[in-house]
Image: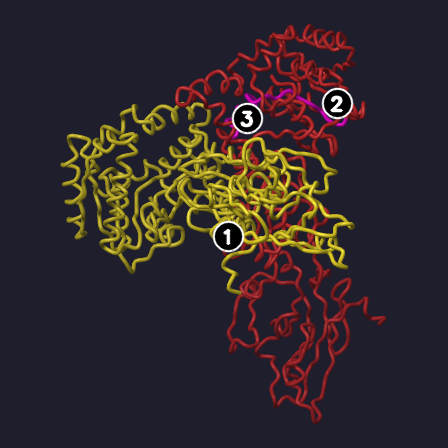
Chain colours: A yellow, B red
Amino acid sequence: MDLQALAEILELKCGVTKSSVLLAGVSGGPDSLCLLDALHRLGYAVIAAHFNHHLRPEADEDARRVAEMAEERGLRSTLGEGDVAALAEDSAMSVEEAARVKRYEFLFEQARRVNAQAVVVGHTADDQVETVLMHLLRGAGLAGLKGMTYTSLNPEWDASIPLVRPLLGIWREETEAYCAEFSLQPVTDASNRDTTYFRNRLRHELIPFLQSYNPRIRTAIWRTSFSLAGDFDTVQQVSRQALANCLQQQSKGYLALDLPNLKGLSPGVQRGVLRLAITRLRPQIRDVDYLSIDRALDFIARPPLSGRTDLLGGLSLIAETDRLYLVDSDARLPETGWLKIDLLTPARLEGPGKVIIADDWALIAEWVDAGDRCLIDLARKASPYEAWLEGERELFPLVVRRRAPGDRFQPLGMDGKWVKLSDFFMNVKLPRRARDRWPLVCAQDQIVWIPRYRPAHAMRITAATRKALYLRLERRTSDKG
Amino acid sequence: MDLQALAEILELKCGVTKSSVLLAGVSGGPDSLCLLDALHRLGYAVIAAHFNHHLRPEADEDARRVAEMAEERGLRSTLGEGDVAALAEDSAMSVEEAARVKRYEFLFEQARRVNAQAVVVGHTADDQVETVLMHLLRGAGLAGLKGMTYTSLNPEWDASIPLVRPLLGIWREETEAYCAEFSLQPVTDASNRDTTYFRNRLRHELIPFLQSYNPRIRTAIWRTSFSLAGDFDTVQQVSRQALANCLQQQSKGYLALDLPNLKGLSPGVQRGVLRLAITRLRPQIRDVDYLSIDRALDFIARPPLSGRTDLLGGLSLIAETDRLYLVDSDARLPETGWLKIDLLTPARLEGPGKVIIADDWALIAEWVDAGDRCLIDLARKASPYEAWLEGERELFPLVVRRRAPGDRFQPLGMDGKWVKLSDFFMNVKLPRRARDRWPLVCAQDQIVWIPRYRPAHAMRITAATRKALYLRLERRTSDKG
């Protein structure tokens, strides 16, 4: 192992300096012993941190050995322990996964305590190859196949202390040779040969098998991961830009994306945007799983764009007209500008006047005589919150209610055709969430006006109309204005 | 197999229409029989093309069967043959590779003959998985791991007829089930089980082995390739834009790229730019190999930026100051603006006058008296093709020659320090190629002026200079001006 090359990796790829302390995770195996000794030789201030998983009979002895080795070099060490087996039993995690969680919790806790610039671990090129194969076997995209990186920040562990892996380009044999050269005595972990562990099966069975196809398969896969890491950076950068272009709103528990914009992106960039968006709401998700992204892509592409699909980690996608919400299950989506009735019992107006239909809305009705005006011109200029109805019809009592099963409507402008209310709402692209509480103004059991959309055909005023009922919705907060 | 889904794939992913003929490559195996029959059922005009590799005893029988099957459906068929074994023996190709070359040559020849819109082949999802694994084993980047695409244009075969693969999302079992359902009788190719062929080993040994890790490994890898194809598109698009930004010149046999611009790109995009640049000069290279790109990246990053490295297929990289050339071994790089001496014998000037030093350049020397002018001011404003030397020195005969081993120079502005001429050239970043023929103006065996760069310190004029030798280079074509 070339110490000078390692020094360059530490400086250029890992971005660490000699001016503050590093916390090294030291299991006591050849990789981490080599790492600890090399960091020390290169003049880094390093603290050895060992986590006792209590999984093997020799565990206490290993811990003692690591502490001793640090002491021999005048280095501080810190020991932690946890009942991994118990965590694995209590959770859905494998023993490997539980050990990993406990170990990193400890390492970052210690790193914060000693104000370390980074946590350093001894992952080697072999670990990289195994990681890539593991992802391949499980079915990963670029984010998985690129493998581990020299430096990474994982908010699950700490928002600002990175995890760095300076040995990522060094083979396990090289760390073993280093230990032999400098008389380091690695602990032997018999469980490393236990092929009931998935990673050990890869190491001891799959990789040798693959070597029968290509004796240099480890190098081939290592280089592949290195090159894919570059491609991943490119895709991330493009996706970040695309997300910035699509993002309409980010708030507690949801993101709103511009749907036509998103649909205009290539599938690769759509994937990237979704992955980033999910990470914004769920920073602790390590790998956004692949099937969720596929499901999201299908959802975005599927016409008509309405409805909802569950993704992962309690996140869902909701499409509303030109918006795609990525939303936490319990987040409240914005309802700005929506009309909605609070009352469960319909509001009634027996004659001209005003009735409150929601916390913030009132309906006002008044008779208007044409006089010498042409009312149809006024009606044509009506705002979405106003309507003019033919005064010769039976209009009172006016009832403002929510929709009910079987509702039908005869929208103005469709030659008197009747449509199902649900179809009408779909046609005007009223978001699903808004439909249940949308106010319907009715007379004689028929819908005479749907505020913001259309009066009914039968109630329309004409050039001959002499008397009209003028309806308008008024925001109650503006009463004082 | 869902025929309707296949129809959609053909239209949307493969981009083929029913308005003109398709040429289908039909080996007679289940995949290609299924393809031929399905295309026919879907109403495509299709011609069956079979290539007889003469590799197996049943080869002639297979060819007859394919022709028969086409005839039964009222389809035209065309048969080709070639001595694949002989080609493999005569070249460095494997039998598989030679068969592939001969087969596609035939298919595209036929496609041109019948004016086909596309060549259609029966590659299945299993072929895709095998292809991805093959690339992984050989050490590929994104371009290899993305696998095959529904449609592709390969200039090696034809500049405008694409190769399409509509069955890429359909598993081999499905094509076999299709054959059984419609009573198609595929030929049995015993060589498909011959594990001396690399691909067969993957199919019959590696994939079953991987299934012991993940029973759904085929689907996992298929989805991975599909997602990587999207990422590849993203990287290609970014790289195409970056190449456009970097490209200074493209001419017969070379490309010139702006080196600082290229160095400013992320490694992933650098890779993409180089891959595209190589493909521009060598469109027939199927996969730009990975190590060549790595070598190129190292070359670009390595200071000092000079020299040359061989890449692949007779292409080299040459760095010259701020330019990177990707160049064909026998291409002539541009020499615009360079000075160069044509004459092998040095040119001499015994006194003031003019001497031709190259096809297009002449040196003119004349005495100038200061009179009441301050010559040093004139000298300071000299163009790179002019120099003023102190008239009190011994300057004639002036000799204009090429460099010679051991040349040293005392550049003006360096306090009389002597430097090796080769170091001086490197410092002023004169491209290597230009150095051998660069004119050196000498007097008394010493370099007194290097045109475009510097006069010698010892020959400098001062405020006290009363008489100077004024030298200038003149383009001979401008003599008439």
Q: Is residue A466 above or below residue B403?
A: above
Which mark is drawn over residue B22? 2
Q: Which mark is residue B131?
A: 3
Asked which secondary structure carries label 1, the reply is helix
Q: Nearer the viewer, residue A34 or A326?
A: A326
Real-space Cα separation, disc 2 to disc 3, in angstroms: 25 Å
Of badges 2 and 3, nearer the viewer stands 2
Q: Amino acid at mark 2?
A: Leu
Query: In this orientation, which residue lies closer to the viewer: A346 or B197?
Result: A346
Residue at image point 53% right, 53% down? A362
The reply to whether the C-beta atoms of the residues labelled 3 and 1 are less than 8 Å apart is no
Part of the protein shown in magenta: B117-135
As measured in the structure, the alpha-carbon distance from the residue carrying label 1 to the one carrying label 2 is: 48 Å
- Residue under disc 2 on the same chain as residue under disc 3: yes
Q: Position of residue A226 (x, y in %)?
A: 46, 41
Amino acid, disc 3: Thr
Q: Is residue A264 above or below residue A210?
A: below
Q: Quadrant of residue A287?
A: top left
Identify residue for label 1.
Answer: B301
